[in-house]
Image (cartoon, rainbow, N blue to C red):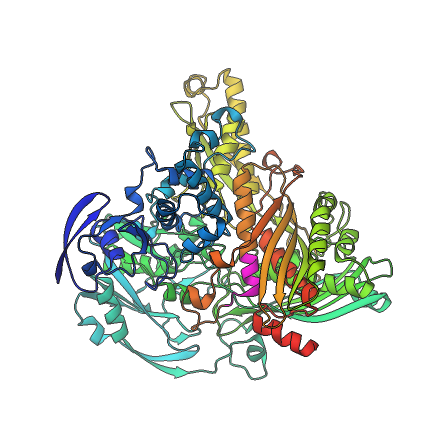
Amino acid sequence: MKKVILRINGQAKQFVVNEDRVLLDLLREDLHLTGTKQSCDRKGQCGACTVIVNGKAALSCLQKVAELDGAEVITVEGLGTPDNPHLIQEAFVLAGAIQCGYCTPGMIMATKALLDGNPDPDEGEIKKAFARNLCRCTGYKKIIDAVKLAGRFLRGEITPDEVRPDPGSGTIGVSHPRPSAMLKACGLAEFSADIQIQGALEIAVLRSSEHHARIKSIDTSQAEQMPGVVGVMTAKDIKGSNRIKLIFDDQPVLCSDKVRCLGDPIVVVVAATKPQAEAAAQAVKVDYDPLPVMMTPAEALADGAVQIHDEYPNLCWAQPQIKGDAQKALAEAAAVVEAHFSTQMNHQAPLEPEACVAYLEGEGEDALLAVIGRSIMIHSHMAMLQGALGWENIRYEEAYCGGQFGIKVGITSEAIAGAAALHFKQPVRYIPSLHESMLLTSKRHPFDMKVKLAADKEGKLTAFINDFTINNGAYQILGIVVGLRALQMLSGSYNIPNVEAMAKLVYTNDAAGGAARGAGPPQVAFALESAMDMLAEKLGMDPFEFRLKNILAPGQSVSTGAVVEEWPFQGLWEDLRPHYDRARKEAAAFKNGPIRRGVGLACHSFGIAEPGDAAMVAVERDPDDGITIYAAAADPGEGNDSMLTQIAAHLLNLPLEKVRLCTRSTEHTTETGPAAGSRITYMVGGALLNAIEQMKRAMAEAGASGYQALKKAGKPTRFVGKKSVPEGPLDPQTGLGSTFESQVHNIQMAELEVNSDTGEVKVIKMTTAVDPGLVIHPKNLEGQLEGGMDQGVGFALREIYVHGETKDWITFKFPTMKTAFDMEVITPRETPRKKGPLGATGIGEMTMVSTAPAVTNAIKDACGVRIYDLPATPEKVKAALVIGK
């Protein structure tokens, strides 16, 4: 042990620590300064734990406290408070650089260290200073903007008041600071691992070392005797179904007789400290009887293949789609292209690990189980936990969520934490490592697609065939939904009279697939948009003109046969044309030498509000004549809090501070459906509109707008609004049926360089042209589009998840400041959607969908080789170039 004295945020403090104690743990555990975050497994990879030590940015997860005697330490809590923020915190809020907020404290501390030494850095110096700070949400553009703005504030060139929107400037189309932004900037937003629960025990989980095996025996005797251990829990200790059911009930909370995937949970160990729990979990002995391992659909569908689930065949779902006569159209076509495309397994990669805490309120059979996690659908997850754990009285609370990108549609750590709290009758914390989080979460499904695309001699599309197989992994989660969404948006933005598809979903022993930004369309769009460029080349047409000629129009039908009423897309192409012409001209100067430049296009029309979707919102007039909105509308970073607040303030002519949100607990909120599918603005915003219309009618009948006037007139002060879309499932024989109630349209243009000697690809610029309907908050819109482009480029070029091998952000190839690129957002058109709230619709996913094919089309334009299997790594590009020579 060693005594050290540190000065932390201006106060001298004395500690006696062991030689291994790191600064991150001292700050979070001893001082409860939880603004400093942990994402990576103490490898110095993420920058979320950045603080300032003796005037320099430092990664607190690597700093040994014993070596810091006499040091001066500043954390984000030492900069400012929401009432008295530091200028850097103001800059991050006003620049729109805060989305989920998990990386924000580390980014702000890195900014302070940079600007203290260099008050006017250029972009290259900013990127160098932030080389170790990761962000998944923003694509880094807004963060660079925030650093530059903070520099201007500190140099006295401009003040925050000159940048801050005037409260009287209106509420729609204005980038007012997000309601949660300053809380996140000051490190005060509580994520799951930040929540302090007195006496909470720590959980560790023994997970399967096998991909597929029967469990012969489990020996926990040694673990139960180890220091600090309170007890162990196995499947027999769970009173409910022990099954997590979203679509199928195929996923156990704890495996009892069989494991189907590497990392399957088997035994829970609860101890006084996390190291004690982890040590005991390692002492548990499991004897396995190995079964054949099938990591691909081909292996799982082979003759004689072992059935992974007794209740469900390995081919767990199949759905054809037949519109017109594609075979006849192919035979009569002037030009046909044919190709085989595939996409990789990918991780959604939110920075926050899958942390959860749980405890009981009360005692006995009437006790309430409180689960605090990072769900984006708290009512559905509560119902799933009730069945799995056999406990009806549950409250699910959503903590602030450090990104999710679809990953939190599935139950992860919550079932284990809830089961442990019930079994041991004590509060528990389950804070998985990054590596464990990667094992236990769902992934983006790999697709294998055999495609044919045809056109007539005028260049009009006539037929499209896509026979695709989805590697579902070991558990269903919502694989069927992903397959259906791929079919529902199969024809993308185009008028294709004849479509033939077959979607097959196959169980394997790989990681389970789940929701991931776009959830199906990114994979099929990669195939379609690649084939569009191939067909344009075969016809001798420019890919821009070829796409423009084939864009769907109102009165025509998508691949499900549904005729669309709205399709405001034609004009967007003309908006992009000058940018495309400029990019083509610039690329032409790089056709010789090893560095070749290319331009690629892709587009997509993303469906929102699928048949059968529904949402409900309650609005209550408060005694001070403000309102409170009750809706389980999660906001893991998109800006849903801004959307709800600004729509309500606009409709009721209220100041923004008079609109309160209650969105995070099942105890008070209405069921609004998941914060997924880009649906919250359209569906929940629509339900909010309906509730406010009811309130306004009541106020008109009362002859006054205030709370007291409503009460005096005998009118209610609480109103429940609803928004629903008529049911319309796809026909099981033809795959035809209704389509989405709204669409958002975009075009992606990639400009990049290919090193023909090494195969390396460097994205120079991504440009997106979007018609998003009415824009409520421009910076939130831009932030979603920029983040989507960054994720799409990662999907295209680098990111691949290999179960058991991808263990951290380095092996995942997480996007960094070094890989950041220039971005431009073009939104000249705001065509109102007839059924959207104030004419708005969602935009969160569609830019991700069309980015990857724009990148691979640009690679083909640059160096003449096409990549059919994502990601387009340097090795694949170089190999294709060698074959081409």
Q: Nearer the viewer, residue 270 or 802?
A: 802
Image position, residue 304 (x, y; %) = 56, 84
Q: Position of residue 530 (x, y in %)?
A: 69, 63
Numbered circles on residues, count: 0
The stretch of residues the image draws in magenta is: 791-800
- Which of the 4 image quadrants contains residue 526? bottom right
Where in the figure is residue 863, as x and y percent of width and height?
A: 68, 68
Q: Is residue 62 left or right of residue 646?
A: left
Residue 841: quarter of image: top right
Residue 799 on the magenta segment = yes
Q: Nearer the viewer, residue 254 or 84?
A: 84
Examine the rendering and report whether any part of residue 472 can be seen. yes
Which residue is found at the position 44% from the left and 78% from the top? 212
Which part of the image, by quadrant, shows the C terminus?
Answer: bottom right
- 411 on left or right of 315: left
Q: Is residue 542 left or right of residue 642?
A: right
**Is residue 130 at least partly visible in the picture?**
no
Q: Residue furthest top?
A: 703
Q: Is residue 33 above or below residue 283?
A: above
Please tell me whether the stretch drawn in magenta is mainly helix, strand or loop.
Answer: helix
Q: Residue at x 70, y 64 (%)?
A: 591
272 lies left or right of 247: left
Relative vertical location of residue 693 with respect to residue 540 in this rendering, above or below: above
Question: Residue 115 or 782: which is nearer the viewer?
Answer: 115
Seen from the viewer's position, the closer of residues 586 and 610 is: 586
Residue 862: horizontal and vertical position, in percent?
A: 68, 64
Q: Is 712 contained in the magenta span?
A: no
Q: Quadrant of the N terminus?
A: bottom left
